Image (cartoon, rainbow, N blue to C red):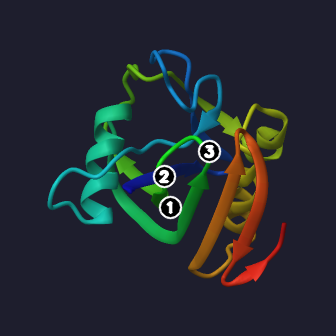
Amino acid sequence: MINSTLCYLERGEEYLMLHRVKKVNDMNHDKWIGVGGKFQEGESPEDCILRETLEETGLTLTDYRYRGLVTFVSDRYPTEYMHLFTATGWTGEPHECNEGELAWIKKADLLSLPLWEGDKVFLKLLDTDAPFFSLKLKYAGEKLVLAVLNGVRIV
């Protein structure tokens, strides 16, 4: 079982996205995702997202919000609990990321990029400013076969 974080830095109508193209054997290879990563021993979700954002972008979050918990179940990977954040404030200057290419992408253009199907579900929840949510996403390979939002099946 894995605990991880994911953050979407928001600048007006854009999100800072990471195109995962640099790591070998990356389960997210060629996908566009937010920034984040796995918890280290003793970290809270907030500790992890602050550290991961700084490591991947060079930015220190100053205004961020815990938006939801996403449970990933897969026939290929261990179950993962992903703590989802958005951020609207930070300091510092972005630097190159060793996991992929960072780019500001218009929210309206996100769904045309290579994304996990389940990411489209929670990106819509973020876009509509949904209250804190629990989302379970089950995959067979890369195909989304089940989505349960706050206990109610939606896919």
- The answer to the question of whether label 1 and label 2 lie on touching residues, with beta carbons closer than 8 A, is yes
Q: Quadrant of residue 150?
A: bottom right
Q: In which quarter of the image is the N terminus?
A: bottom left
| Residue that mark 3 sits on | 15
Q: Which amino acid does label 3 sit on?
A: Tyr
Q: Identify the mark at residue 29; answer none if there is no mark.
A: none
**How far, Cα to Cα, is label 1 from label 2?**
6 Å
Which mark sits nearer the N-terminus, 1 or 2?
2
Say what secondary structure mark 2 lies in: strand
Say what secondary structure mark 3 lies in: strand
Around disc 1, counting alpha carbons within 10 Å, would you say few (fewer than 14), some (14 to 19), or many (20 or more)? many
- The answer to the question of whether label 3 and label 2 lie on touching residues, with beta carbons closer than 8 A, is no
- At horizontal 55% and vertical 17% (from top left) the residue drawn is 21
Residue 87 image point, x, y percent: 47, 57
Q: Relative to 147, does residue 36 appear above or below in the rendering?
A: above
Q: Which amino acid does label 1 sit on?
A: Leu
| Residue that mark 1 sits on | 84
